[in-house]
Each structure stands twice: as structure tokens, then as C-alpha cells.
Amino acid sequence: MENYRPWLYLAAVLLLLPALLINLGLLTFIDDEAIRSLVALEMKLSGNYITPTLNGEFYYKKPPLFNWILLAFFELTGHIDEFTARFVTVLSLLGYAATVFYFFRRHYSTKIAFLNAFILITCGRILFWDSMLALIDITFSWVIFTSFMLIYHEFEKGRFWRLFLFSYLLAAIAFLLKGLPAVVFQSITLLVYFAYRKQFLRLFSLPHIVGATLFLLIVGGYYLTYHQYNSLQALFNTLVYESTQRTVVHYSWGATILHFFTFPFEMVYHFLPWSLFAIYFIRRDILELLRRDSFIVFNLIVFLANILVYWTSPEVYPRYLLMLAPLLFSAFVYLHFIHREERSWQFRTLDGLLFVLLIIIAGASFAPLFLERSAWIIGRTPKAVSVGAASLLLVYLYRRWRSERLLVVVLFLLVFRIGFDWFVLPDRNANDFGNLCRISSEEVGNKFIGEPLYIYGERTLMQVTNSFYITNERRQIVPIKKDNFVKGPVYIIDPQAYPKVNYEKLEELYLRHGQKTYHVGRLK
């Protein structure tokens, strides 16, 4: 069977697209997805592509580049919906993985580079969460990771003009995606690595000055244009607040200390199963092993230098760390083959644990056949049997093909994601209050197409998911009206915030959070 092992790699490629695309557009947008898509939609409706808005109000929290990308895909496909917005994330993830493969192939075999790329895709946080959402983070992480790789490879070749120009170009792109975090990653990486390589004075050289100037020209050019439409003070205040609100600046020392000790365990959970490979670091000669590979040394230096920002910040979401994941995973893969060759206790422990996990999950793959809440899913039996049978086959191959076990785990996770797409996503959609929110919002938007529709007052705290679906249905911005309320237009009203307003209720609008309703009506 050795001759057929290359087909495992083809199988991973073939399974990847269905795993990432099946039912991709099924679930209702979460808040952050709705924000990105609504900002893009309002750009189209207003014709203003420079100053982002939400419900017609200036939106300061993120620069506009990701919204431009979303809008470009909306225009290219002719669809403004969940699938199109999330497809941007899928493409970014594929580009990110291809970048990992490209740079790692410079140092290792095709097999090792392939494994590193697919380990990124199949870590739990990406495979079962971020790859399914229309968020900035995977695109941002791709740009930042590419910058890391360029810094290393251009440094090794002594091409400092290219290093600074290209890394600052990528930093500018990253800034226009997400703001100040791009500056933090660029600054920390250059400072720490150049200091480590005893080239600190190069940070005061002409190439660095020119690179930084390029960054300022790109970012500054956007904000000079922005200033023609709106004041910059509120914008910059918000950008700074967004970058510091999750740090010790806004939290007590007690919360920070607690986070410091719980953070590693939280990250192990989110990046399973590959985070279990951290066990390979438990050995006396670990520093000696790592120093043998300068690329791994760079990856770990950059990882440790940048992770400290998040390790000391009490409110951190795992998606903020996705650009660092391949850096650490690369060390895991590097150490794996050393431990495998030695048949170390770490390898044997991890090997046995993975085998047990695969058996448990393979058995659970048949569960939809016996769950009443899955009975309504079309093709339940063939889908469950195919996922279960494929899982059992991979468990067998895991024991049979020792040299390909990491790839077998990758295949197993892709098969499991397909089962997740077929059974978990439809179940969530059928039982998620968010779907009722989407339906009621689309009904309200459709019913009042062509009529003036406003959000009544500042105390009607409109949830952005509702705003997106209403706006998308009407293809008109739904603004907040703060005064001069008159009869005739239709208003979205929070009945708890405005109990004394006299109006005729026409519809109810279900909200995603709180499972409460707003009223849609006309003033009497």
C-alpha cells in the first residue's frame, strides 16, 4: 500500500473545498460579520467609499480596506449575502495556507511544507469557527504572517532595502485592514529580531527610514482624503481606544494576573488537536534541538515577542493570534519527527492519545443516525454512514501507516468538518434565535421598501445584524432619527426605552441578543 500514499495528499486537497464551503452561507451573521457587510453595503448605497458608516452614522472602529474587499466581491458576484461575505474568508485562508507552504518549502520537503499548511487550516479554532465567518482576522493574519516571512528571508540574504520596503508595504495594508495592531506587530518583530541578530543599528539606517516613510505615505494618504469628509480627532481617539481597551490599561491588576495564568490553557483548548504537540517541548535538550534550525529559531522568537502583548491583555479572542499559529506549529512539526525517530515517551503518549481521540470521534460520527433532532435532515443516512465509514477507515490507516499519521489526522479533521457542515450547521440554524432575527428583519425590510424608515431616537439601540438584513432587503440606509419626529414615516422603536411614545404597531422585529422585540410602526 506504500505506492498509494501520495494519494493521501490529493485526498486532502479534494476534501478541503467541500469541507470549507458546504452550508457556508447557512447561518445568520453574528454581530461582527454584520458590521463588516453593512459598512460595505452602506458604502455602495451612499457612494461614499472613504468614511465608513453604520446606520448612516460615522463608524470609526476599523479602517475601510476589508469593507472595500467585501464590496468588490458583492459587485463581482451580484450577491450581497452570507455566502459571498464568508467566501472572502475562505479565499484568504487558502491564500494564507499557500503562503505557509511557499515559504516553508524553501526550508523543508514538500511533505513538511504541506503538513504545516494543512495543520494551520485544521486547527480547531480555524476549522470550526473562523473559517466560517466573514471577519477581518484571517485576511489580516495572512498579511502579517507574510511580513514575518519576508523579514526573515530578506534578512538572511542581506537585502535590507527589500526587507524594509516590502514589510512596511504589508504593514500599511494591515493597518488599513485593522488599524494600530499592524504597527505593534511590525515594531516588535523588527526590534526583537534585529536585536537578537546584533543588527540593532540597522533600524536607524536609510532603508528603514524609507520603508517607514512608505508606510506613512500610504496610511497618511488615506487619512488626508478622509479629513476632507470628516474630522480625524474622533477617528484617532477610537482607534487608540480599540487597541487598548482589552489591555491592563482598562482592567485591574487582579484580572491581568488571572489572565496571565489561564491564557496558555485557553489557547491549548482553542487550537486543538495540534496544541497538544506542546508536550514535545518537555525535554532537557530542547534549546539545543531548536538552535539547530535558524528558521525555527526565528519563528519562536517572533512568536514569543508578539504573544506577550496578548498574554498580558485580559480580553483576548483567539482569532487575534492566528498570524502566530504557524510559527508555533512549525516548531511542533519540527520536533515531532525528532521525537518519532527516538520513539520518546512524549511521542508515544501523544500517539496513543490521538488514536483514542480518533476512535471516539469516529464512533460519534454515526450519532446522527440515532438522534431524533437529525431526522429531518435530507440524506441523513447516506451522509452519516459516509462520514462514519470514512472516519473508521482513517482510524485504520492511522494504525497502519505510521509515517503518514499527521496527514491522516488532517484528513480525519476534514472529514469531521464535512459531517459538522451536514449536521451541526443545519441544526444550529433550525434552533438558533438568530434565524428568527434574520427572517423578521427581511420581512420588515421587504414590507417597507420605498417608504421612509428610521430608527427612533438614540435609546433604540439597533442591533447591527437586524440593520444589515433590513438594509439589504430595502437597498436603502436605515438612519437614526434623533429629533423632529413626524407622522408618516415608519419607525423602529424600542418599546421599553420609549414607553410613552404613541404609535400604531405594524410589525415586530426580533433581536438577536436578549430574545426581545422592537416594534415597527407609525406615530399617531
Image: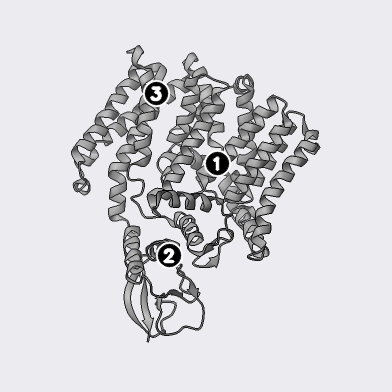
- What residue sits 39% from the left and 85% below the top? 502
Residue 72 tag number: none
Q: Residue at image x 70%, y 33%? A: 162
Quadrant of the rendering where the C terminus is positioned:
bottom left
Front-lying residue, 399 or 491: 491
Whole-Å distance between the Cαs marked 2 and 1?
Answer: 28 Å
Q: Is residue 329 above or below residue 110?
A: below
Residue 203: x percent and y percent?
A: 77, 37
- Residue located 35% across and 62% down the image: 437
Amino acid at dot 3: Tyr
SS category of the residue bearing label 1: helix
Disc 2 element: helix
- Badge 3 local density, few (<14 within 10 Å), some, or many (20+)? some
The picture quadrant where one finds residue 200 is: top right
Residue at which label 3 appears: 9
| Horizontal and vertical percent position of residue 376 | 19, 48
Q: Which mark is residue 467?
A: 2
- Say which amino acid is labelled 1: Ser
Left/right placement of residue 50 relative to residue 389 reads right
- Distance from disc 3 to disc 2, alpha carbons, whole Å, reads 44 Å
Return the disc, 1 or 3, that comes first in the chain's sequence. Answer: 3
Apparent side of residue 23 relative to residue 41 in the rendered image (left or right):
left
Among the two numbered marks 3 and 2 on one chain, the one whose residue lies closer to the N terminus:
3
Task: Residue 141: give its label.
Answer: 1
Q: Would you call the spot at circle 2 few (<14 residues within 10 Å), some (14-19), or many (20 or more)?
A: many
